[in-house]
Image: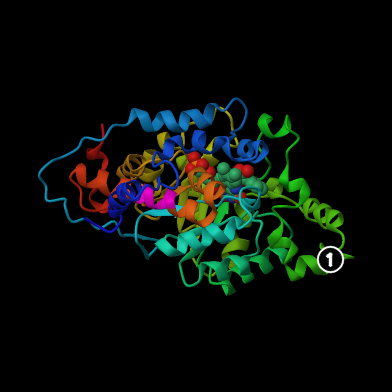
Amino acid sequence: MTGFAAYQREIFELDAAGETPPLTTDLAALEEAVRAEVPADSYNYVAGGAGTGSTVRANRSAFERWRIVPRVLRNADRRDLRATVLGMEMPAPVLLAPVGVQSILHPDAELASARAAAELGLPLVLSSSSSRSIEEVAAANGDAPRWMQLYWSGDREICASILDRGKRAGFSTLVVTVDTWIRGWRPHEMDRRYSPSRQGVDMAIPFSDPVFRSRLARPPEEDPTAAIQEWQRMPTGASKSWEQFAFLRDHWSGPIVVKGILHPDDARRAVGCGADGIVVSNHGGRQVDGAVAALDMLPEVVDAVGAEVDVLFDSGIRTGADVIKALALGAKAVLVGRPCAYGLAHAGEAGVRHVLRSLLADLDITLGLCGYRSPAELGRAALR
Ligand SMILES: Cc1cc2nc3c(=O)[nH]c(=O)nc-3n(C[C@H](O)[C@H](O)[C@H](O)COP(=O)(O)O)c2cc1C
Ligand SMILES: O=C(O)C(=O)c1ccccc1
């Protein structure tokens, strides 16, 4: 047994002591479990998808179509979940996906996520639309591994300044999200007229940036409206193409991962431009309604570039079995978005910790029950 599976026993012991587990252990049911306790606007913002929600549903049904074929009596009692991603060893092949504006869920926001991630040693991917600054999150994360996501907007000087701050604050890896250069058509946000961005909640990073601040007549603390307008006036990824990727390569010395790839040709293009990794993702179904399930494109992308770079996956991961399926189809690691957000909303750092420990314990136990001792042993033969 590895350390992770022990959470199962701990939960029974909590129960025996008359304490209920902090939150359901069924991470696929978390959304319903927290619904009543999260403000309706925040809940809708997190749970929602683009359009009719068809891509959100497709992500989950793609996992349903693949089944694991367990193997037995294979000495899988001692397991090792460690994985090496982009040359870095991680305790398990799981990362916290970049999720912006966490202060709408809990006052501790990204600091709570950073502390929970650090406790487990799992890399946090800080959203560039965070409600806390790069430096504050780094301090909360201590010496744990951390990656930084970039919405590659703004002008070059500000972009370079943000990258430089990330490097100095100990973020090892840059994740460039390419599927959200404008917001998708999201009726559940529009119909409620709910937009944290319009209130500047997602602007902690630019507002604390010296180059951005030098452009303002008055600092954001004195005139937030003007600062918000100035940030939103910046050119967005609408004017970007692969040619401009060289700018990021020039300004970031560590590994670069391109997030939001579905087509194998785009994966090849990213690798041709110098990307060190790919995240196969449809942004959790939040951008293109009717988009293909991310899981359904994973094998093609792995066939296209998996020999050259590490392919990661997100969009719909809820259980240990889901992680196993993504790894068996060739992902080196997975990112988890909404479940961590719900844990945060429920109980801050303790809630995120519960979600991650539950996922890792489920992964550990299920992997063993399927006859595997490590993620590296998984391949397509594990599935039907
Ligand atoms: C509330 C919310 C905010 C998000 N913010 C970002 C972001 O700032 N940057 C980014 O690259 N992805 C963002 N994402 C997408 C996630 O990183 C991830 O791709 C997605 O949530 C994975 O799907 P899942 O929620 O089914 O796990 C966000 C997702 C949610 C739910
Ligand atoms: O909502 C999202 O999916 C997202 O990526 C985002 C972008 C900007 C601010 C907050 C979240």
Work out whether residue 274 can be spotted: no
Q: Nearer the viewer, residue 145 or 350?
A: 350
Location of residue 226 by image quarter: bottom right
Residue at (56%, 35%) from the top-left corner? Answer: 35
Per the image, is 358 magenta? yes
The disc labelled 1 sits on which kind of residue?
Pro
Q: Quadrant of the N terminus?
A: bottom left
Residue visible at 71% across and 48% down in the picture: 239
Where does the magenta region start and end? Answer: 354-360
Colouring scheme, one of rainbow, by chain, secondary structure, one colour: rainbow
Furthest residue in direction bottom, as rendered: 168
Instruction: Give how far across and how far down residue 328 sits, in percent.
Output: 30, 43
Instruction: Count neighbours of disc 1 (C-alpha within 10 A) and say few if under 14, some if 14 to 19, many if 20 or more.
Output: some
Quickly name the residue at label 1.
Answer: 219
Query: Is residue 283 visible to the viewer in this orientation of the structure?
Result: yes
Q: In the rendered image, which quarter is residue 326 located in?
A: top left
Residue 249 in the magenta stretch? The answer is no
